[in-house]
Amino acid sequence: MTTLLIKNAEALVSMNETCEILHSVDIYCESGIISRIGHDLDVVAEDVISGSGMYVYPGLINTHHHLYQTFTRNLPGVQNLELFDWLRALYRIWRGLTPEMVYYSALTGLGELLKYGCTTSVDHHYVFPRQAEPTLIDRQIEAAAELGMRFHPCRGSMSLGESDGGLPPDDVVQTTDEILRDSQRLIERYHDSEPGSMCQIALAPCSPFSVSADLLEQTALLAREYGVRLHTHLAETLDEERFCIEAVGMRPLAYMESLGWLGPDVWYAHGIHFSDEEINLLAQTRTGVAHCPTSNEKLCSGRALIERLLHAGVPVGLAVDGSASNDCSSMLAEIRTAYLLHRMAMGNQAPTPADILELATKGGARLIGRPDLGSIEEGKAADMFLVNADTLEWVGADFDPASAPATIGLHRPVDYTIVAGRIVVKDGRLVNIDETAVARKARELSRRLCSGR
């Protein structure tokens, strides 16, 4: 049994039902669960953290990512491209991915997320080069376990190559049978649906312009047979909208609806170009959206109408998206970007700073089906991060700790990240791996991938 005590935290931003903020409290965690919250708890723990000057927040939940893209950040040739041209250029590089590259890119991206307060991350891996072993997602799961992070890998897929009218090269697509067989294998081997689970699988064909209708239908049937969730990109760009109208005579959401892709077990990445009627349909069916503001800005895709989605009751979470369209893996940076983007567009009608924090915590937990995550309450999973507010950068944060991540921002690693009651980041450094050695190896592999060697 593991035990952890945070002693006398200056502020606890609970994100419970009333978004209560507690002061000068202890938090006792036992066997990965928050056991008690109170003043001057009479308990003994294996690990004790002084909460003096510390603000404690629920662990952030990243609801959409592409970890392999950490190896193709900051490439000069793609920085001014929009989505379709950006993808065409990068597919030529990503077709060289190896299992070792996937493993080290996962260590890199997930490690960066942990250092900035994220305790649970989705990943959407859909590039499976023909020359690579089919166990790429296994290597990601291995990396997450090594880091001590809660992980929701999505078995992505592409079945519609260039020769069939799709966007990706033919040598990174797979047959429907190959995809479904591996999807079933991953679910049976790794998916854990119990509260406190460290790994849950979702099924995630890449997008309407890279997979067949048959794959989308068959994937939905398989996911529901096993009780796992469904995820894909949707309504990201007007190019995608035109593609769907020309190819199938329907707007993207109508196309997905025709294939069984609506419901509380489905969430879409981006969701920028939805009409009011489509937003109402999402709300009625409780179909969710992962909001990716930085990626949407960088690729000139547009602004997701988060205020309308939230007002209608659509489940919404926050996400960093792939590192090559961000180009970082920091949920704290995403919180501030989301707040400022909507503030600029909507003024006093925009989501508040605390609303954005809620998207990154409770919103994300709802989106991925994890009622055990998203807030700091007795009985919930012991996932949280701590920030030392006794610093020059956070002078003035005292007036509203729940708003500070959005209004002030945090531009350095957090002081502690805790997952399942275990310290995985301490003093801003990862506890379970040698960061320097991993970074050195990852840089070598990144250069090899981008040079085509």
Image (tube, rainbow, N blue to C red):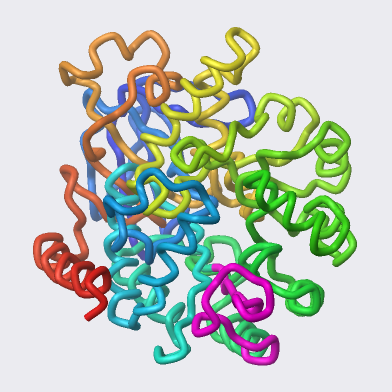
Name the residue: 36% across, 23% down.
Answer: 11
Q: Is the C terminus in the top left, top right, bottom left or bottom right quadrant?
A: bottom left
Residue 427 quadrant? top left
**Could you tell me residue 41's position as x and y percent?**
36, 35
**Could you tell me residue 156's position as x and y percent?**
58, 72
Name the residue: 42% across, 23% down.
Answer: 406
Task: Please tell me whether residue 272 is drawn above or below residue 418 in the rendered image.
Answer: above
Asked whether, in this view, residue 36 is left or right of residue 346, the answer is: left
Residue 194 quadrant? bottom right
The magenta stretch spans residue 415: no
Camera sees residue 35? no
Task: Please tell me whether residue 412 is drawn above or below residue 52 in the rendered image.
Answer: below
Q: Give the range drawn in magenta.
A: 154-178
Q: Is the N terminus in the top left, top right, bottom left or bottom right quadrant?
A: bottom left
Camera sees residue 66? yes
**Could you tell me residue 7's position as x and y percent?**
28, 34
Asked whether, in this view, residue 94 is left or right of residue 173, the answer is: left
Of 55 and 280, the residue lying toward us? 280
Asked whether, in this view, residue 389 is left or right of residue 21, the answer is: left
Residue 261 quadrant? bottom right
Task: Please tell me whether residue 223 is drawn above or below residue 316 in the rendered image.
Answer: below
The magenta stretch spans residue 171: yes
**Could you tell me residue 251's position as x and y percent?**
82, 50
Name the residue: 66% across, 39% down.
Answer: 272
Asked whether, in this view, residue 69 is left or right of residue 227, the answer is: left
Of 352 and 69, the residue lying toward us? 69
Of 303 and 354, the residue lying toward us? 303
Of 115 and 255, the residue lying toward us? 255
Q: How many labels does the image show?
A: 0
